[in-house]
Image (cartoon, rainbow, N blue to C red):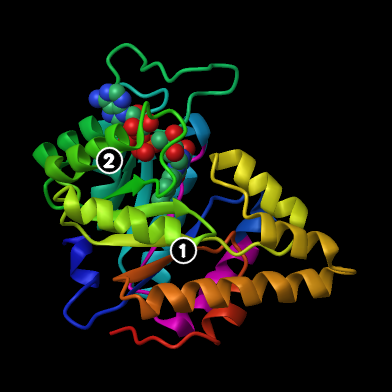
Amino acid sequence: MKLSSHYGDGRFGLSFEVFPPKTPKGLEALRGHVAELMRFKPGFMTCTYGAGGSTRDKTLDITASIRRDHGIPVAAHLTCVGSTVDELRNYLSEARDLGIEYIVALRGDPPEGQERFEPVDGGLSYANELVTLIRHEYSDFGIAVAAYPETHQEAVSADADLKNLKRKVDAGADCVITQLFYTNDDFFRFRDRCASGGIIAPIVPGVLPVTSAGQLQRVISNCGANLPEGLFRELGDATDDAMALDIGIAHTVRQAQELIDAGVPGLHVYVLNKSQTTSAILSQLTFETH
Ligand SMILES: Cc1cc2nc3c(=O)[nH]c(=O)nc-3n(C[C@H](O)[C@H](O)[C@H](O)COP(=O)(O)OP(=O)(O)OC[C@H]3O[C@@H](n4cnc5c(N)ncnc54)[C@H](O)[C@@H]3O)c2cc1C
């Protein structure tokens, strides 16, 4: 099944991303939050793959259980970090056996303490190689890849990063999901550059609502995106948590509605394993899923 089937021709593709909780209590809570989010009729859900493969089994379990519990298509993330090609194949075979429809194919970040990404012996160096492996050996999977409207932090230039994205799409990815960003103009410029560069897969903006200045700073430093000064100041000036929450929600509502009105094919929401903030935002947006 193709991921691209969720977008275009009047379809608006809504997807949610969760991560594997560390504790059984967190896992139980996640079930409730996922159930709550179903009222927004997401086209699919995704679950991340922890740094260095630390959540390998949990990623597969959670992804498969969402599919089982809610009957919607799901995507398991997979990175090249710390895995040989055979280990990647084992994961992909398990995912296929569990009925998982899609893979979000990534290179991953260098492990802690390592400045540059180094593949293990018999491993892969870049996400496009993982896409090629999946397309050739597991051709039934729909494949999403990552993109960076503000350019990936290790890329030698924005053009080189765009060429890399094209390489991933040409290798067989059928959907592109972006890193979070807070300034829509960055996304619009990126979308135009993708179009000029001949990248024809749907470019789906990733949106991560933040509800405090500290959280915004952490999120930004984790992924190397640009700090939105205005939002950061507004959140910092909030006199209590409830006020900061309202500011964060209002910002994402404005950001997401502007993206929708500008014709994006869908939205990928980084829900951070909680349904309340995402629900408050989605209830205020005007769009139709099919
Ligand atoms: C939607 C989304 C989901 C994510 N999910 C996860 C997750 O579940 N787990 C996780 O650990 N991380 C996740 N990440 C983070 C991601 O792993 C990091 O951003 C990582 O640093 C890059 O991964 P990539 O797949 O984009 O790498 P690549 O596409 O391989 O690119 C990595 C860097 O190498 C450059 N490059 C690529 N090919 C070449 C080449 N041939 N020669 C020279 N340079 C090249 C690129 O320009 C870029 O700078 C996610 C990111 C996004 C946007």
Residue 52 picture location, percent across and down: 48, 29
Query: In the drawing, does residue 120 fall left or right of residue 30?
Result: left
Q: Earlier in the sequence, mark 2 or mark 1?
A: 2
Name the residue type under label 1. Answer: Asn
Would you name the residue on which mark 2 appears?
162
How many numbered marks does the figure carry?
A: 2
Vertical arrangement, residue 211 with respect to residue 178, above or below: below
Q: Residues within 10 Å of mark 2 (few under 14, many from 20)?
A: many
Q: Is residue 26 left or right of residue 238?
A: left
In the image, which residues are magenta? 28-50
**Residue 186 percent coordinates (x, y):** 43, 55
Q: Is residue 267 above or below residue 203?
A: below
In the image, residue 214 lies in the stretch drawn in magenta: no
In the rendered image, which quarter is residue 166 located in?
top left
Residue 32 visible in rendering? no
**3 with respect to 221 (left or right):** left
- Quick one: SS at disc 2? helix
Residues 141 and 98: in front is 141
Residue 47 shows which numbered tag? none
Residue 235 on image: x %, y %: 76, 63
Q: In which quadrant will I find the C terminus?
A: bottom left
Q: Amino acid at mark 2?
A: Leu
Which quarter of the rendering shows the N terminus? bottom left
Residue 265 seen in the current view: yes
> What residue is disc 1 on?
184
Residue 23 location (% of width, % of height): 67, 49
Name the residue at 20% across, 74% down. 8
